[in-house]
Image (spheres, rainbow, N blue to C red):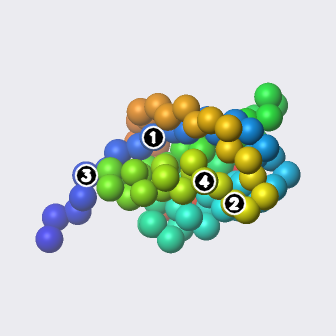
Amino acid sequence: MARKQQTAKRWFVRGRVQGVGYRYFAQHAAAALGLAGYARNLDDGRVEVYAAGPEDKLSEFAGMLYRGPQWADVRGVEEQEAAVERSGYFEIE
């Protein structure tokens, strides 16, 4: 069976997404889907999330990012196509 084509996306998540476990939520969701990448806080209060993997898994992951963890209040998500930079694991930066 052939490996699925790898693609990557970057999301910029705004709202109450820092200090509420959002990066850990993203890491757990990505690991469950077998995605590589990272999540990091930005100085402007947003969280940047990058993930690489099969398109169908990235779509599922995006849906999770729009919801976020229990204490988050996601007000908007900007999604961008990205180059495939990583494989293997998802980390918090």
Residue lying at 42% horizontally and 57% vertically, measured from the top left: 60
Of marks 4 and 1, the one in the foreground: 4
N-terminal-most mark, 4 or 1:
1
Residue 21 x, y percent position in the rendering: 77, 59
Task: Describe the element under mark 1 as helix, strand or loop.
Answer: strand
Q: Nearer the viewer, residue 29 or 36?
A: 29
Residue named by callout 3: 5
Q: Which mark is residue 9?
A: 1
Q: Quadrant of the N terminus?
A: bottom left
Tell me the amino acid under the disc marked 4: Arg
Q: CA separation, marks 2 and 1?
A: 20 Å
Task: Describe the element under mark 4 as helix, strand or loop.
Answer: helix
Tell me the amino acid under the disc marked 2: Pro
**C-beta proximity under 8 Å, tags 2 and 3:** no
Q: Is residue 2 visible?
A: yes
Residue lying at 61% horizontally and 67% vertically, measured from the top left: 28
Q: Residues within 10 Å of mark 1 (few under 14, many from 20)?
A: many
Residue lying at 32% horizontally and 50% vertically, measured from the top left: 55
N-terminal-most mark, 2 or 1:
1
Q: CA separation, marks 3 and 4?
A: 26 Å
Task: Describe the element under mark 2 as helix, strand or loop.
Answer: loop
